[in-house]
Image (cartoon, grey):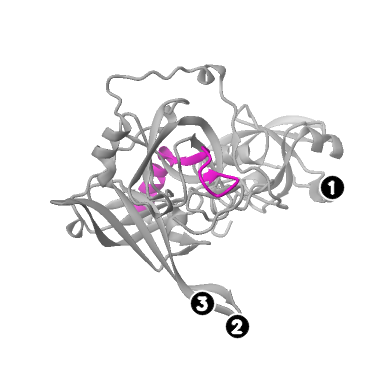
Amino acid sequence: MKRLWSSRWAVATGSAVTVLVVVALMATGVLPVKTEQTTVVREKSVTSAAATTTVAMTSTDMTPAQIYDKYSAGVVEVLSTFNNVASMSPYGQSSSSAQALGSGFVASADGFILTNAHVVSDNGVSADAVKVVFKTQSGTGTDTTTVAATVVGIDETSDVALLKVDPAKTPALDPLPLGDSSAVQVGEAVVAIGNPLGYDFSVTSGIVSATNRNLQSPNGSVIPDGIQTDAAINEGNSGGPLIDASGQVIGINEQIASQSGGNQGLGFAVPINTAASVMKQLQATGKVTYAYLGVQGQTITSDIAGALGLSQNEGVLVAAVSDGSPAAQAGIKGGTQQTDLQGQLYVVGGDVITAMNGQSLAGMDELAAAIMKHKPGDTVTLTVVSGGKTSDVKVTLVARPNGA
């Protein structure tokens, strides 16, 4: 999608991203106390074995040209129209219509198309009309076919949206095979196909630069297991596929890190395993259900710990616990007073969560990512420091309440 961009972190459509020190986690029940600008992407800990994995080319790997030739027909332009968009003029506030451009790809032969939520929605409001443009071959070269699309569902928590077109009105649909993002290795070759800056059906190539990145979604939630790539991604690439050398989609291109708003070799994709799970739920019910913990908290660093007199150098300082939530039922306590630390308010006096299921937590984004990987009904074990004593607390997660 092609619209606005921020000077540091932006979705690949260019929409500005608000970055949180205390990550806004509506889906998991972990909510912000105060926000300020900082980095949106964090790398979770990986084992040394994973870090030293060697990626070898195989005889079955395809070149970027072969991938484009075989799968580009399954990649589409997504054109979203928003009516009554508020704007300021010399005569005061007015409204007008606006159009945004992004990418998508065919996920099934019966007309389902995956894209990013922010390609077809604006601040949670769905586009008034969505059209999909297919690349077709004619006798004289390349042509296009444009058809109307129905928005099946939008999930801003994962930044995934599902569209549906009528196969009777489209060219022959060419679904792209979905891969396994959990098997992605740093260093393997990838290509991105999309519509950067309006240059339709473009291909760029590169490698997987990193895995296990925590990305920030449009509603401030954490998207775990994001894929970082140096394949060129720009405004308009949002929603397009990131494809590995075997020709399988491993991610949906979603955002960039940039000083200028353009590509600087830092692109990020939603893992396809997450997108596939979201697609199944949207197909079945039109919505996605997430696990819910029910705490508000803030990230602890060694500097913050020293200033606040905490014995833990990292973890999550629990500011408040929602009434009736799984955290409340498990006896987790929130803070009792506010402390101003160089302009940042911290709610102190509450418990500190340092680990989940034996895995240490560096802060809020890691807690959020861990909760995101679970389903309602799952029981997790939190390591909690309360009143100077450390204990393991079992918590059974529930479905996220409406509005949480």
Residue bearing the label numbered 3: 95
> Where does the image place residue 81, in percent across and percent down from the top left?
40, 67
Judge by depth and name the residue closer to the eye, 357 or 178: 178
Sequence-first disc among 1 and 3? 3
Q: How many marks?
A: 3
Q: Is residue 352 left or right of residue 228?
A: right
C-beta proximity under 8 Å, tags 2 and 3:
no
Residue 284 shows in this picture: no
Q: Amino acid at mark 3?
A: Ser
For the N terminus, the quadrant is bottom left
Q: CA distance from mark 2 to mark 1?
A: 41 Å
- Which corner quadrant holds the C terminus? bottom right
Residue sitting at the far left: 139
Q: Name the residue: 51% across, 46% down.
A: 255
Span highlighted in magenta in the image: 256-284
Provide the secondary structure element on which disc 3 rests.
strand
Q: Which mark is residue 342?
A: 1
Residue 91, label in figure: 2
First in sequence: mark 2 vs mark 1:
2
